Amino acid sequence: MSKSDPQRLATVNIADSPDEIVLKFRKAVTDFTSEVTYDPAARPGVSNLVSIHAAVTGLSIKEVLHQATGLDTAHYKMVVAESVIQKFAPIRNEIKKLQEDKSHLIKVLEDGAEKAKELAAPIYREIRRLVGFQ
């Protein structure tokens, strides 16, 4: 998983559906060793999964590895996917709620445009004066 990788499956987005997240983790590149370990130099793919798991759960790398004892990488990918799904669920729900309330979005945009005009007006007037248009 990498945010700089141009492939669509390489990046998990907050708004991804649970099915998309599972697919992306299932397709995540790991090596042929099935044990879950943390060694970024020798096993970058599995180590990245461990880092992601630690980040979304708030656990340390050591705690994550302890929880993953006995799991092979295929099963571990699903554990990480489920942790990410749970972490993103409230955010995804809020995004969906906001997208469904078009009037609220329009109001936010209008309020933002008005505030931007207020902030920009003095600068705009000063530039017009300096250029000689006033």
Image (cartoon, rainbow, N blue to C red):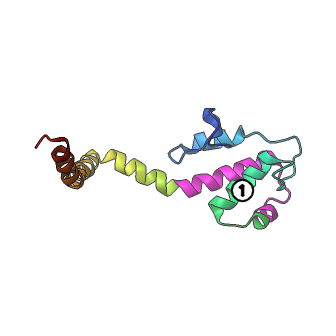
Q: Is residue 89 left or right of residue 69?
A: left
Residue furthest right as drawn: 33
Where disc 1 sits, the SS reads helix
Nearest the camera: 110 or 129? 129
x and y percentages locating residue 20 in the rendered image: 59, 39
x and y percentages locating residue 18 in the rendered image: 57, 45
Can residue 85 be found in the magenta stretch?
A: yes
Q: Is residue 98 left or right of residue 81?
A: left
x and y percentages locating residue 65 in the rendered image: 80, 61
**Residue pictured at 36% horizontal, 45% vertical:** 99
**Residue pictured at 60% horizontal, 44% vertical:** 12
Q: Quadrant of the N terminus?
A: top right
Residue furthest left as drawn: 134
**Residue pictured at 80% horizontal, 59% vertical:** 68
Mostly what secondary structure, the magenta segment?
A: helix
Q: Quadrant of the C terminus?
A: top left
Q: Is residue 15 left or right of residue 120?
A: right
Nearest the camera: 122 or 76? 122
Q: Pointer 1: what residue?
A: 51
Placement of 87 over or under 74, stated as above or below: below
Residue furthest top as drawn: 7
Q: Amino acid at mark 1?
A: Ser
Total marks shown come to 1
Q: Is residue 73 left or right of residue 54?
A: right
x and y percentages locating residue 116 in the rendered image: 25, 51
Q: Which residues are magenta?
A: 64-88
Can residue 83 be found in the magenta stretch?
A: yes
Residue 131 position by quadrant: top left
